[in-house]
Image: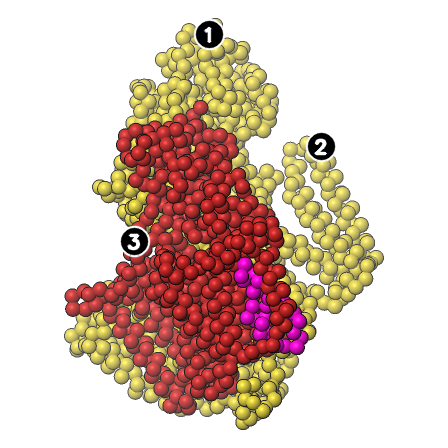
Amino acid sequence: MTGEHLVWAGIALIAVVSRLVYLDFAPLNNAEAATSLRALALVQNGNEFAGAISANTSAINPLFTSLQAFLFGVFGPSDFAARLISALAGIVLVLLPWLQRAGMGRSRALWMGLFLALSPTLWFVSRQADGAVLAWMLAVATYTAWRISAQPSHQISGPIIAGMCLGLLLACGQHAVAPLLVVLAARLVSPAVPIDWRRFGSAAAISLVLGSTGLLFRTTGLGDVFNGLAGWWQQLTQPGPFVAGRLLMGLAIYEPLLYISALIGIIWLLVHRQSWRGEWVNVARIAVGLVLLLVIQGRQPDLMVPIIMGLSGFAAAGADAVVRNIRDHAVPRFEGTLASISFVLLMLGAVAFRQYASSADTTWLLLIAVAALFNLALLAFGNLLSGFGVGLRAIAIAAGLMLGLHTLSAAIQLNQVRPTNPAEPYVIAPPGEELRIMAQTVRTISIRAYGEGSTLKLDVPADTPASALWALRTQTSLTLRGASEDSEAALTPISQRPGTADGGTADGGTAFVGTGFVMQRSLNLNAVRCTPAGERTDCSAVARWVAFREAGTPSLTQWIFWLRGDIAALASGSR
Amino acid sequence: MQKQISIYEEGRAPRESWLDRPLLASVTWEQVLYVAFILIAIVSRLYDLGVRVMSHDESLHTYYSYNLVMGRGFQHTPLMHGPFLFHITALSYFLFGDSDFTARLPMALLGILMVALPWFFRRWLGRSGALITSFAFLISPSILYHSRYIRQEQSILIWSLLTALFVWRYLEGRNWRWLIGLTIVLALHATDKSTSFLNVAMYVIFLAPLALWELYHWRKNRRDWLNLIFFGAAMAALLVLVSALYAALGTWLAGAMGLKDVAVGVNTIVLSLDRQELLFIGILLAISVPLVVAMAYLLRATFGKWLAEATVAAPSLNVVLVMVVTTLFMGSAALLIVLNRFWHRIAGADLVEISLLGSMNNLSNNAQVVTVMFAISFALIAISVAIGVVWNWRRWAVYIAVFIGVTLPLFTTLFTNGAGVGSGYVGMLGYWMAQHDVMRGSQPPYYYFLIVPLYEYLVVIGAACAVTYMAYQSFNVLRAKPVAVVPVTDESGDSSTSTSTISEPPTLAKTYTSASTMSRLFAIFMVWWMVATWAIYSIAGEKMPWLTVHFALPMAMLTGWFLQRVVNGEVMAQFRHREGWLASGLSLLGVVLIGRALSVLGGMDLSNGAPTQTFGFIGNLLVVAVGLALVFYALGRLVAPGTIARLLTVSAFAVLSVLTIRTAIMASYINYDYAREFLFYAHGAPGVKIALDQIEDLSKRLGGKEPLSIGYDSDTSWPMSWYMRSYPGQRFYGEALPDDFANMQVILLGDGNPRRSDNEQKLAGQYVKFDYMLIWWPMQDYYDLHKSAQESQFGADGLTRIRYMLSTPRTREALWQIILNRNFQPYAELFNRRDLTPDNWSPGHRFDLYVRNDVATQVWDYRVGQVAGAPAPAAVAPVVNRVESPSMIAFSPDGARYVIDHKGYRVFELDASNNILRSFGGFGGGVGKFNDPWGLAVANDGSIFVADTFNHRIQKFDRDGNFISTWGKPGMGDAAGVGQDTVFFGPRDIKIDSTGNFLVSDTGNKRIQVFDPDGNFLAQIGKAGAGDGEFNEPVGIALDAAGDIYVADTWNKRIQVFDPTYKFLRKFDVAAWQSMDPNVLQSVENKPYLAINGDTLYVSSPRGGQVLAYSLAGQLQPLADVSFNPNDWPTGLAVRDNMLYVTNAANGQVSAFVLGAAPQ
């Protein structure tokens, strides 16, 4: 075992911990739930709503659906199992630069792995029960396998692995198209690699068939692939919940470490006139990613993956260059002192910013300016006293540490601490944690009334949010007929109640008692803006959002769980 | 210098990368064990870290850290020690979010680091010694618990260890980088807790004589001694003179500039930066420059040459100087107290009021103190500068810059809190010196001598062995000569000296002759460290359980040092052959047998002379003795005698380690929320998190547009300020409920709220109530052992109490159960202490969670609670509400009825409808307070007599419940006494005869005592035994019309009758008691009472759920109409107007039965 192995082990540990810890902390959102219900329908044919969904819709991502169904079959339909495939794909994605060490250099590959592991965006998309990250991982794997085919030791295995990855990527149906476009663009800008097309094609075809049909258990999967490929084009015109600005805002706020490091990397490459031969793939990833982000109307956060990949490539170059420069030229005592002072000043700026965000007192902004000015003075002082580069290196160390802390904090807050915070740019209309309380309530009442937790006859309308249906997935007596007078229990939007013919709020059906549950929260981030306040402009709302990810009061979508009086009496212990 | 090669530079061979460096090529077992310890530390420190409820102090720390991260700033206050904890906790919140887990995470990580640190002490402790020390840190109950606790203790342990490391590495190698490290650690310690001053004092006191010793051995120049003494004296004189000068100058200048006083000047500079005040402080500082120059010149002229040579010869002097010049100026408060005492002797009055040091945050209110303190501070700064300039100004500048560079950003929270300069550099020590007299916690002076061995017995024994070992080995360190000149070796192994411009010249670099000399010196230092810790913390006014970690640290290191010497090659060689393993196993068995022998001896009681018990004990001892003999015989055949001793020592420590692990697990993972651990203080009870779960549940279930509206009062504000932080609808309402309280869906109300009863009345009927324990403290029966009987709240001196506790197997067993298992039940049963059961723990503090009725209706699970103020369940007969466990009812001649509630410690007066008119009492040992009162009687004049059972006394009250007098004190025996000299042990009943004399059943002393109406002793009836006229647990007393006295002789299962002259008349068995299980019969609830109506004697049998009727001659009578449920405990009896009143101690009721015609 060498030092390199140890560092890769550390990166793998970060990837595993970040992708798997608290994976089921937040309930599945509507998109995740719809995907998971399709997989659930494959393993639970008797489940009415699962059956209804499977009858009406085809799998968007047949490979993912098959894998999810397999996990549900083995481990049961839990939130954790629903997201596990994505998480594992996310871990593999982080480790893929290991295979590219020969091409990009070992230390740079390490840096890239570290950036990918820490990226809040990748961290986030890897924890969604959605097949997109699987497709992106397969796309990067295809490209990587194709690249290593050039090595003599991989001339046979390389094409086969690349073909397998491509076949599996195609089996991802609708999710395969965008990654394919990025792979093609990367292939076009990269140096040509001779490849055994026969092995490649065979492996791709076999993988496609087996992957899409779930090892031939579900033959309609192959059709779903083509449906999915065709359906992708609808996303170009059908708007989704995310606007490009929101996702770019996410990039801006989560990934400063990445894009600042990438900028340093690009400048370093330009200044030192390094060969760009291996860098165009990063350019292609960023460019195609940005184009797709702007063009596709039904965009999702996973479209940020190619941009993150491309930026990571450049950021790795930047970090590698800075570290080498420090190692080769730095005077530890002097630059360490400067870096410590710079770090304290940056911390002062950060504390002042949070104070401003909390109090809206603009005098704190002066302190930020003072901290910035002192840092500039430090830069000048270092450079004047000991030569060009000294101040820069010191500030780079301090800023790198600060940005590292920021990135870690942003990633953990987004994914582990408050994953249902609607003020996060990547999180739209997240389901309430109350969904689980509702499911638990239904189960408790069922046990009290009937002895079993899944036998309460619960009526829900056909347009019930998928996240609620997923939360109630263990209820075997659930129907999609909607609330009626003879319902024992029902779930309705807040404006309706059971017991009346028209579903209105008339006095009929007073025997029902109801409790409200929040289905989802949503927040309009347009509220995060500077507003005129007299002669000044008040930007504390922006600061508050940046510092604490808070942006006013979210609007709630509430549904009511109704219980008929006699069942309520039973549930209360009266018999 | 050769240019470094980059692999990006083509045409040059790349150098070997660290990426290729092999990692596992030379792994040793030692490294594997360290890794294993660290892994166990990770698990033990992080497992379930967030599950424990925040204690009072923890909630303060975590809440203000949360404020900091939320942009609300942080204002340092010495009350909560230094700012380091708050900043590092805020960083944890920033990274990982705010929760109980992340609040404790930084200290837990430092706890893991601590287990690794002994690796760096191998050179002095030995490899095995360091490993054992690491293990001791790993399993130490107090260290483990406090590494999972958001307080400063864990970080202080790290600073203490690093201080020792850096000091000794410097002494050994004289590389100045260690002094830089030392300065950083001193700075971090100073910003963490005021213990930094104790730490510095401890080192200076040790190192100054060491410096003398070094000087003596270096130069044999006795003038060094004189110089050092003169140098110290000169510093002291300068200090006084310069302080006085600054005080005078400051006051004069403030007057001249029109400022109110110096305090205003200082206060405003840190708060408002007013120009005039700035000028004031500027002038004051400007005056310092010539003063410093003058002092430096003076010192240089007098001591300069000597100091330059002395610091080269004596490395310890360098360390002392680093410590002095960096921290001296923060010690103004200590000097102020010295000056104050000095002044008091001269002028007969204090210079300043020392208690004002406790509120240094508000400087302008403490003008006098601030004037003097800042004068002293300026003087200290000036002296520090002067010493630094004379010593080595370049080094001094670096140390000061490092020290200020670390402390200033932290004290001022990165320059956002200017007041932190005053509160940090001056106020920290001042506040805690003022607290010395406050003696927060009121712990006795011997506190640590009880609590440290209770948890840290392993290292206490280890340290004691180490000290004994040192004495035995006739320590000869003083004969060692640290004079050999060897080159300094830096960390990289390069034998050339450091390239630093301010490092020692190579010709002057010295080190000690050998590693063993350093090891011995270090051992002496560890002993000093331990002794100083015991002395300092025992003298300090505030004694708290978390400070035990400071005791554990040096003792753990001493244990490692000692065992290193025991576990030598001789012992390790045993494990290389089969006989060695056998010998090790036998030695372990030997230790276990010795433990068993002690256990048998501890349970020995030959006092009652029962032959079976005597033979049992002797038999047990014989078996153990034979076993031990066999073990030692076998050991003697297997290994040499010296090795036996070593094996036995190792085995003993192995057994103690297992017990220590058990103790640690109990404290940190089992009892972590319970007050049964003495390691806890003002600890949150588990009910807090249950209530919080309910609130969280309600918040999610209600799910309305508006957030859940929650109110909490001043009494529950800690820890609720922390726990309510994320509820947008939370509201602090102080003491009285606001007018719009009905808008609150959930209300928290503490029992310490002065407006509690008003609040309760408002909430009655509208809210569902859940009752929980909020915070509790450990049992405090160990208090007052150093006080006389008159001063002690327990009414007996410490020696008597200890003697009593150790006198019988039963008391020893009760004590042992507390020590070993933290099981208070036997102790509580022995002394009938209801305040030691979890439901009624004292000292403790409860609170109620109120849920509004409409909310509870929506969330139907919640209607299981009792509706506040609603009637109690249907009663058998007249009901007394709010009486928890009535033990006796009595009537006054005018018909007033009184009920005594022994669990509630109160006497209630009821009206004819059984409504409560008034009550008096309450728990405690003071006058008018009760501890488990059982007996009650009312005299003809309306005076009320209460048998205050476990205060072992009788108290007398007037008709309205006002205290009149008390007599009696606790004691075992049958001596007669008058007034306070009267000895009782658990008096249970009291009856007044026709002449006004009263009889008391002195239950524990197995007798009835008779007193005249003034409380003078008249006679004693009976003594311990089973014969006629002898008692075993006499409880209830009754008197018939003829004046004959009936006594429930409970454990003899009979009633005994005496005539009015106290002569035995007759006895008759109580069949219901004869057949009762002995454990039930002797249970604390089964205390039978008697009442007589005409010719019928009524006898209660509480655990039998019966009231029995006997003729006065002892014939059982039918009593069909008086019946109880099996779970009822009919206890106290009274007859009036042909009604039998029975108190039911199980359900808080009093039942009344119409007797009709007395049975024939």
The C terminus of chain A - image quarter: top left
Chain the render paints yellow: B
User: Which of the 4 image quarters holds residue B1042?
Assistant: top left
- 10 Å neighbourhood of mark 2: few (<14), some, or many (≥20)? few
Residue A459 x %, y %: 41, 36
Q: Is residue A169 magenta?
A: yes
Parent chain of label 1: B
A55 vs A171: above or below: above
Q: Residue at x 63, y 64 (%)?
A: A202
Residue under disc 3 on the same chain as residue under disc 1: no
Residue sitting at the far bottom: B1
Q: Which residues are magenta?
A: A142-171
Parent chain of label 3: A
Residue under disc 3 on the same chain as residue under disc 2: no
The residue that disc 2 covers is B612
Q: In this rendering, does residue A290 appear at all?
A: yes
The kind of secondary structure element at disc 2 is: helix
The kind of secondary structure element at disc 3 is: loop
> What mark, if any, has residue A553 been given in the picture?
3
Q: Name the mark nearer the viewer: 1 or 2.
A: 1
Chain the render paints red: A
> What mark, if any, has residue B1159 been given in the picture?
1
User: Which of the 4 image quarters holds residue B423?
Assistant: bottom left
Q: Residue at x 76, y 49 (%)?
A: B628
- Which callout, 1 or 2, points at the residue further toward the start of the chain? 2
Residue under disc 1 on the same chain as residue under disc 2: yes
